[in-house]
Amino acid sequence: PQDPPHILLLASSSGHLSTLVPLPETTYRRLLSVTNQLLPALTPHGGLNAKAHRLPDGIRPVGVEAAGGRTIVDGAVLARWAELGAAKRAEIAGKGGYDGVGELREELEGVLGWSGLSYF
């Protein structure tokens, strides 16, 4: 049997909890594509820039590269996929490389915790 992936649980001083889960390269690329299509399609809360706080801070100590690393696929954005209409969900699924809405829904169920660390 395949070992379950490691899950890194993070807690901040503000009380927020987050998890980091490793993704296979193909899943990462497809979900990143879906995330990039969702951000302009969704109405941001309070008129805030939905992408600005996900970018690395430009001010770093000398010798620390600010642009290093890869983008994290944000599960909170992916979970809002269900807020879209059926036509827009189908369009985003197709552009993300999925055969249909059902295939993307299955992948989201696996990644967002509905089959892992969840309380649903």
Image: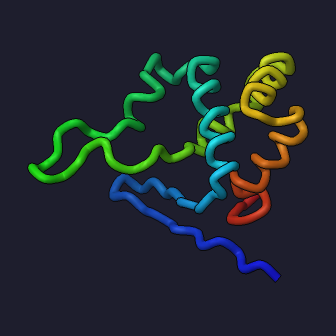
Q: Residue at x 46, y 16 (%)?
A: 47
Horizontal side, residue 91 vs residue 48: left or right: right
Q: Is residue 33 above or below residue 47?
A: below
Tell me which residue sits at (45%, 29%) in the image: 51
Outermost residue, left side:
62
Q: What coloring was used for the rendering?
A: rainbow
Q: Is residue 120 left or right of residue 15?
A: right
Where does the image place residue 77, in percent across and percent down from the top left? 60, 36
Q: Nearer the viewer, residue 50 or 61?
A: 61
Q: Is residue 92 left or right of residue 11?
A: right
Identified at 60% across, 73% down, the residue is 6
Q: Can you give x and y, in whole percent of width and height, for residue 61 in the image? A: 12, 50
Of residues 78 and 25, the one nearer the viewer is 25
Q: Residue at x 66, y 38 (%)?
A: 78
Measuring from the top left, give residue 93's x and y in whole percent.
79, 30
**Whether residue 38 is situated above or below residue 19 in the rendered picture:** above
How many tags in the picture?
0
Given residues 103 and 116, the one toward you in this image is 103
- Residue 27 appears left or right of 15: right
Compared with 83, 14 (above or below) is below
**Viewer-nearest residue: 24 or 19:** 24
Quadrant into which the C terminus falls: bottom right
Q: Quadrant of residue 95?
A: top right
20 in relation to 108, above or below: below
Q: Quadrant of residue 119?
A: bottom right
